[in-house]
Image (spheres, rainbow, N blue to C red):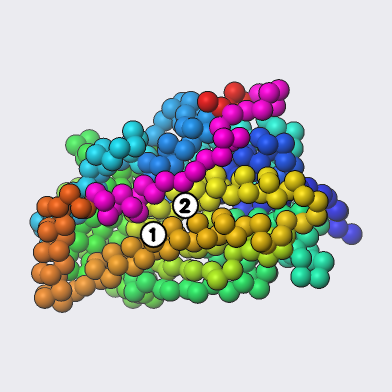
Amino acid sequence: MSAVEETDVLIVGGGPAGALLGFLLARRGIGVLVVEKQTSLERDFRGETVAAPSVVTLRRLGFGPALDAHGFLRTEGVTMRMEGRRVMHVDYRRFALGEVPVDIPQPALIAMFSDAAAEYPTFEYRFGTSFTGLLRDGETVTGARLRRRDGSTSEVRARLVVGADGRFSKVRHAAGITADVQHMARDFLSFKLPRPADWGLQAELVVDRDRHLVVLPTFPDFLRVGHNLPKRGLGALRAAGFEPFKAGIMALDPRLAPVVAEHLNSWDDTSFLEIFTAEVPEWTRDGLVLIGDASHTCTPILGQGVNLAIQDAVVIAPVIADALATAGPVPAAAFAGFVTERRRHKAHVTSFQRLQEKALATGSTPGVLLRRARYRLLDALPLKYRIFGGVLNAPHGIDPADLAVPAGAGRSGLGV
């Protein structure tokens, strides 16, 4: 027989969105169980950029000392090079935020959230626990069925289930919500390299016709490199052999040639990522809400995944707290304002990403010349900071209750 548990909020998915939301709710005295199917945080994550607005937010929430104690790598700007010529540079230090994007390992970021939340008696973060289905009373979600790695099962009754389980969300599927998936024309193969001593703190986009590299300085002393490949082209790439692939990387950016030659040794050093966006017509059911990539999946362009996840958690926390003040499961209608606000911003981000991907996929000579001319023109105009700022630095509110620790609650010392 399955064990039966109860909590106010069950969060499925212990990534940045789920862990931060769990902390914010627990700090308000709300009962929270966060379940994560992985057995630990010791695994490699691709998205480790925390955008400047999220750095500001985390410091306002009280995580500044933890960020500084761990350490991170600042990203001061992004440079675009096309067919051997620099065509654009955006200096992140020119935005009036007081912060720039930082690179910090996701395991460390998630641990900061969950460790702080663990100071509150109403919080639990449970590893090695998979979601297997929703519990319902008619059309209302009332909890979920879970399975641990040892095979034991449980039913968790909750007034709200939060699906924070990513781009292939099982919670979304179980709720009968279908995503509108739009595949990009290309996918990504990424790998890490030691960062040369003379490499700056700039993200680099290196383009040659329809091939490109994204090169990101990564904490503490690495470069994370992403290389595009045609959709469903991984098999052909592998069949052509690893050495031609390696030679292609070195030809695209000769500055990387020495470290690629020494440290990129086999396909095992690479990681594949399928690129798509997914827009979801419904984010809620009575007793259920989706956040993060589960509600609206973006692409890796400009590293917005963690940023959007953090924003979702911060914006929805007071909505959940207010909704729980009334007895019974949280109605879908309680999230109408949250969905409208967050859908608008996420749609703006993914629309910009699709435009960038369309431009990068251009391979014809006229298209390449026109693309290069457009970027060089944009680079000469102050307008570029307005355009990039609208995507990178969109503001969001923080509820005053999330900026202070209630008297006598917790021992983490978080607050402002």
Name the disc covering residue 316, or none: none
Foreground of the two, 363 or 291: 291
User: In the visual, does 279 lie left or right of 77?
Assistant: right
Residue 92 point in image, percent of width and height: 27, 42
User: On the image, numbered disc 2 is attached to which residue?
Assistant: 308
* Quarter occupied by residue 369: bottom left
Distance of label 1 from label 2 (alpha carbons): 9 Å
Residue 56 point in image, percent of width and height: 42, 36
| Crowd rating for badge 1 (residues with CA inside 10 Å; few <14, some 14–19, many 20+) | many
Q: Earlier in the sequence, mark 1 or mark 2?
A: 2
Task: Identify which amino acid the numbered label 1 is placed on.
Answer: Val
Residue 8 seen = yes
User: On the image, numbered disc 1 is attached to which residue?
Assistant: 349
Assess whether residue 393 is covered by the magenta stretch: yes
Residue in the image at 76% along x and 70% along y: 139
Task: Identify which amino acid the numbered label 2 is placed on.
Answer: Leu
